[in-house]
Every structure is written in C-alpha cells, then in structure tokens.
Image (cartoon, helix red, strand yellow):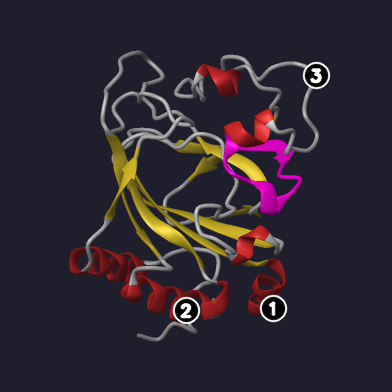
C-alpha cells in the first residue's frame, strides 16, 4: 500500500476497501443509547426505536485501525483519536473531546477533526451541522448536557435553538438550549469536512428512506495536522 501518493482531503476506493477489510477482521463496539441522543426520527415523519445506535471501531483500541490511521493520515501514535462508525441514527450535538478516558490528550490540546462520510443508503445528501459554540474548558467537558448545565460553552445565543427540520432527532433539552447554527454543510461521500475538535457539531436528521451512515473521523493536535498538510 502506497499511502504517500493518496490525496489528503478525500478518501479513494483503496481506502474504502481497506476499511471494509478492517471491519471484517475486528470486533466492533455497540453505540449505546445516551441522554444526548433521542429516538431516531425521519424528516418526513415516522420513528424507529433501538437500544443502540450502531457500532464503532476506535482507533485507540483497534490495532488494525490504529495502524491504518498512522500510515494513511500520518497521525502520531501518542496523539491519535477517532473512529470508524456505523450509525442507524445521527448523533446529536457534541465536541470531539474524549472525556470517558482519563487524561486523554484532547482534554488539554487544541485539536482538529477530519471527517469523512464513507457510505450511506440515503436517497439525498446528508448534512453536518456546525454550531457557533465551543467548549470553554476541555478538562471539564463531560458531554453536552453537562456543559449546558455547568456553563462550559462559549458564545451562547439569547434565544433557544428551537425546532429545525434538519435537527428533528434532538431531545428537548438540546432544542431548548441556547445553541445557534454556524453553518449546515452537505456531506458528500468520501470528501473531507474539517472543524476544530472543540466546536460543537451534530449530524443532521436522516432524510426519509435513509437507514444508516458509516463515517470516519480523525482527531489530532492542530499543530501536527498543519505540519502534515505541508
């Protein structure tokens, strides 16, 4: 595999083939229901319930994925983060700060997220929603609801987020919060989206007829990313 000749801002067929081989050869973790995610809903009506939201392989714990991240993206082992995930409903607002692992490097380092939609059955474009808010204190981040309750978000709006047709899957506690939209980005397959890892972001509600998406995220220190891009 010749990684240094591959584009740095998108996936290619070889990448997708390698990721699928990694999936086959490794046991994934379930994405369990947590309070910041709601029962899956569709834009044009209908709901479906599940006790989990899909599965994931974490780059920190899956040896094959970890090695692929290092070789493909030039990520250094000590500053590695991200996952390959299959979701049957979009995630709600969150920051890419890993708070479930004690002393994780994202708690004290300015990081960048590279995001790729690998595969979906959606009949129309999916979207990613970026908010105007970021995390104030990385070390104190413990998820969105905790951040709302403990005033750990910057630049809160004067009015509540409300009901938006591309975020109908969010629980009421998020809709009633003072988040505000920075931009809504269409998410074409294999093309890179990038944002600061401390910026709040969310998957958009699945269009009617969409049952899953598989995405890849890569987290690493901002300075390391800028050096790799040269």
Q: Position of residue 31 (x, y in %)?
A: 34, 44
Q: Quadrant of residue 133?
A: top right
Which mark identifies residue 151?
Answer: none
Residue 97 can be seen in this image: yes
Separation (CA) of disc 1 from disc 2: 15 Å
Separation (CA) of disc 3 from disc 1: 38 Å
Residue hosting label 2: 70
Check contact, mark 3 vs mark 2: CB within 8 A: no
Task: Tell me the residue at 69%/67% (across/down).
Answer: 222
Q: Position of residue 173 (x, y in %)?
A: 56, 20
In front: 222, or 36? Answer: 36
Task: Tell me the residue at 59%/64% (across/down).
Answer: 103
Question: Taking 95 as reference, is 208 left or right?
Answer: left
Earlier sequence position, callout 3 versus callout 2: 2
Secondary structure state at the residue bearing disc 2: helix
For the N terminus, the quadrant is bottom left
Q: Nearer the viewer, mark 3 or mark 1?
A: 3
Task: Tell me the residue at 44%/28% (across/down).
Answer: 205
Residue hosting label 3: 158
Few, some or many C-alpha atoms within 10 Å of disc 1 (few <14, some 14-19, many ≥20)?
few
The residues colored magenta run 128-144
Question: Taking 74 as reference, is 206 left or right?
Answer: left
Secondary structure state at the residue bearing disc 3: loop
Few, some or many C-alpha atoms within 10 Å of disc 2 (few <14, some 14-19, many ≥20)?
some
**Would you place residue 181 above or below residue 196 in this image?**
above
Q: Quadrant of residue 142?
A: top right
Q: Position of residue 47 (x, y in %)?
A: 30, 18
Check contact, mark 1 vs mark 2: CB within 8 A: no
For the C terminus, the quadrant is bottom right
**Would you place residue 139 above or below residue 105 in this image?**
above
Secondary structure state at the residue bearing disc 1: helix
């Amino acid at each position: 595999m010749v990684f240094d000749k591959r584009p740095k801002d998108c996936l290619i067929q070889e990448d997708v083939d390698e990721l699928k081989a990694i999936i086959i050869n490794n046991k994934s973790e379930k994405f369990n229901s947590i309070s910041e995610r709601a029962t899956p809903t569709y834009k044009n009506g209908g709901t479906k319930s599940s006790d989990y939201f899909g599965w994931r392989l974490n780059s920190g714990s899956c040896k094959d994925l970890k090695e692929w991240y290092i070789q493909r993206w030039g990520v250094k082992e000590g500053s590695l983060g991200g996952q390959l995930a299959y979701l049957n409903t979009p995630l709600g607002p969150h920051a890419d700060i890993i708070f479930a692992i004690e002393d994780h490097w994202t708690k004290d380092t300015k990081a960048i997220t590279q995001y790729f939609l690998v595969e979906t059955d959606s009949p129309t474009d999916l979207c990613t929603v970026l908010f105007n808010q970021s995390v104030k204190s990385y070390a104190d981040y413990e998820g969105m609801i905790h951040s709302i309750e403990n005033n750990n978000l910057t630049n809160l709006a004067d009015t509540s987020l409300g009901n938006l047709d591309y975020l109908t899957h969010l629980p009421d506690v998020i809709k009633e919060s003072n988040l505000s939209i920075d931009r809504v980005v269409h998410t074409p397959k294999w093309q890179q989206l990038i944002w600061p890892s401390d910026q709040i972001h969310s998957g958009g509600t699945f269009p009617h007829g969409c049952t899953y998406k598989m995405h890849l995220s890569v987290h690493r220190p901002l300075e390391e990313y800028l050096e790799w891009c040269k």
